[in-house]
Image: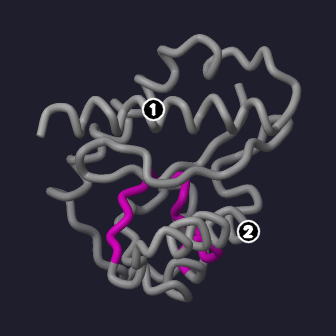
Amino acid sequence: MADRHSRISSQGLVVSFTAPLAGNHHDSYQIEQRLDSLVKQMSKSDIRVDGLWVNADSGFDSKSVRSCCIKHGIQLNVPDNQRNKGLTMDSNHYFDELMYQKRFVIERTNAWADSYRTLLVRHDTSNASWTAWHYLFAIIQWCKFLDKL
């Protein structure tokens, strides 16, 4: 499966996502470039990111992720990663447990995306077709949401 990073609204709607990366990588691989890409996409759509709260799992508890979020004015809500104990990480960051519990919306959206077989098992070899399938998934989810209004 291709690695993707997505920004998902509190309603579970995909707001933006990054292009796929080939190979197996940890969550924060090239994270600065990928976060910059997400912020750029959102800015093009007139979505402000300053003051935005981002829930992420402990795999994103790193200096590079924190500094990138600070640079863009994003409030990162991530639990301490136990593997970072003893390192010189700033442990004085704010963590909101109640907000973090709402991460199920993110996981549910990822599960929905994975339920589309073309998205889960990447049959396409070009980035353009992979990206197009993900746009199609996002459009379908938005249409379902707007239909309920």
Q: CA distance from mark 2 to mark 1?
A: 21 Å
Left/right of residue 121 with respect to residue 50 in the rendered view = right
Image coordinates for residue 141, horizontal then vertical, percent: 36, 32
Answer few, some or many: residues within 10 Å of disc 2's Cα (few below 14, many 20 plus, some between 14 and 19). few
Q: Which residues are magenta?
A: 52-66
Residue occupying image coordinates x 48% and y 57%: 81
Image coordinates for residue 140, horizontal then vertical, percent: 41, 29
Where is residue 129, by image quadrant? top right
Q: Please tell me which of labels 2 and 1 falls first in the chain.
A: 2
Mark 1 lies on residue: 110
Q: Which mark is residue 33?
A: 2
Residue occupying image coordinates x 43% and y 45%: 14
In the structure shown, which secondary structural element does the residue marked by tag 1 occupy?
Answer: helix
Q: Amino acid at mark 2?
A: Gln
Quadrant showing the C terminus:
top left
Residue situated in front as seen by the camera: 128 or 75: 128
Q: Amino acid at mark 1?
A: Asn
Residue situated in front as seen by the camera: 63 or 115: 115
Let me know if residue 55 is in the magenta part: yes
